[in-house]
Image (tube, rainbow, N blue to C red):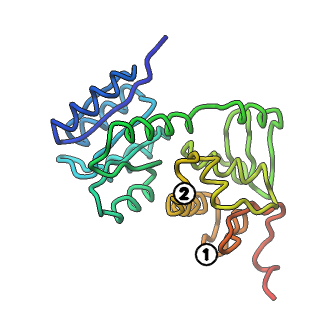
């Protein structure tokens, strides 16, 4: 059986060795990189299942590397940030990262985040049940559950696994408000309850990809203080104005 490949990039040789060794002990194949450029090359050549990127690295930092990767791949990315650097977390998530780890972190936390990211990217039994639906269309938005393909007015919309899971869950509950807690638990897992900023950043990214005007969304709507819902019948804002 082929091992799951993970690219790990950090310019701290001691931390890089520690992370690499612990992932190898869990049975993963690890490709280590000491800068963002080297990591990008490995991602392009090896198509890993997961990427761990430190924010501060020479040649190319984690933000630039994330941006470059998202131009050609939806591979899950976990960014490594320094404690207290909340703006780094938000920026990384904005650029397309799926999760973050705050340094210093324990081996248990590292492995839990890695397992969660890999789980989110896999085709689960729940996904398989909904694939029986075939496709679902709301306005110009179509979700093909079999191919995990999203199109808007016939044009493919590239989504990360996390973005797809959020949209698919909202679509499966179209017209009903899904609470933030329920979305976090379904998409990320129970251990992520309370991480509302991760959800907000991903909802914003989804709107940037799906909505013609993100200030006046037609598809993914907010129920303030509660959660989000996918509109069953998106209408033009021209007709909505009172």
Q: Where residue 202 is drawn, which disc sits there? A: 2
**Residue lying farthest bottom?**
242
Residue shown at the point (80%, 58%) measured from the top left: 139
Above/below status of 88 relative to 106 = below
Residue shown at the point (75%, 52%) measured from the top left: 171
Label 2 close to label 1 by CB (< 8 Å): no
Is disc 1 placed on a helix, strand or loop? loop
- Horizontal side of 58 relative to 146 (left or right) equals left
Question: Which residue is labeled 1 in the image?
Answer: 215
- Picture coordinates of residue 94, whole percent (x, y): 45, 59
Q: Can residue 93 be seen from the camera position used here?
A: yes
Badge 2 crowding class, 10 Å Cα cut-off, few under 14, some 14 to 19, many 20 or more, is many
- Horizontal side of 181 relative to 7 (left or right) equals right
Q: CA distance from mark 2 to mark 1?
A: 15 Å
Q: Earlier in the sequence, mark 2 or mark 1?
A: 2
Is disc 2 placed on a helix, strand or loop? helix
- Picture coordinates of residue 86, whole percent (x, y): 35, 64
- Horizontal side of 171 relative to 29 (left or right) equals right
- Picture coordinates of residue 181, whole percent (x, y): 63, 58
């Amino acid at each position: 059986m082929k091992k799951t490949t993970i690219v790990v990039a950090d310019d701290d040789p001691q931390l890089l060795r520690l992370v690499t060794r612990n992932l190898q002990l869990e049975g993963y194949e690890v490709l280590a990189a000491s800068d963002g450029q080297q990591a990008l090359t490995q991602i392009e050549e090896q198509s890993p299942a997961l990427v761990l990127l430190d924010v501060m690295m020479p040649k190319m930092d984690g933000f630039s590397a994330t941006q470059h990767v998202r131009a050609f791949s939806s591979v899950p990315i976990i960014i490594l940030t320094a404690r207290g650097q909340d703006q780094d977390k938000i920026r990384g998530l904005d650029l397309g990262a799926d999760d973050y780890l705050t340094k210093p972190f324990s081996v248990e936390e590292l492995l839990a985040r890695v397992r969660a990211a890999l789980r989110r990217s896999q085709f689960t039994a729940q996904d398989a049940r909904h694939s029986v639906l075939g496709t679902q269309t709301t306005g110009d938005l179509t979700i093909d559950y079999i191919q995990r393909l999203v199109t808007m007015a016939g044009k493919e919309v590239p989504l990360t696994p996390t973005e797809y899971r959020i949209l698919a869950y909202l679509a499966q509950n179209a017209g009903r408000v899904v609470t933030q807690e329920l979305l976090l638990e379904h998409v990320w897992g129970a251990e992520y309850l309370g991480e509302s900023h991760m959800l907000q950043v991903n909802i914003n990214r989804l709107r940037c990809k799906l909505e013609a005007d993100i200030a006046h969304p037609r598809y993914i709507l907010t129920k303030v203080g509660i959660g989000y819902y996918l509109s069953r019948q998106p209408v033009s804002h021209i007709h909505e104005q009172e």
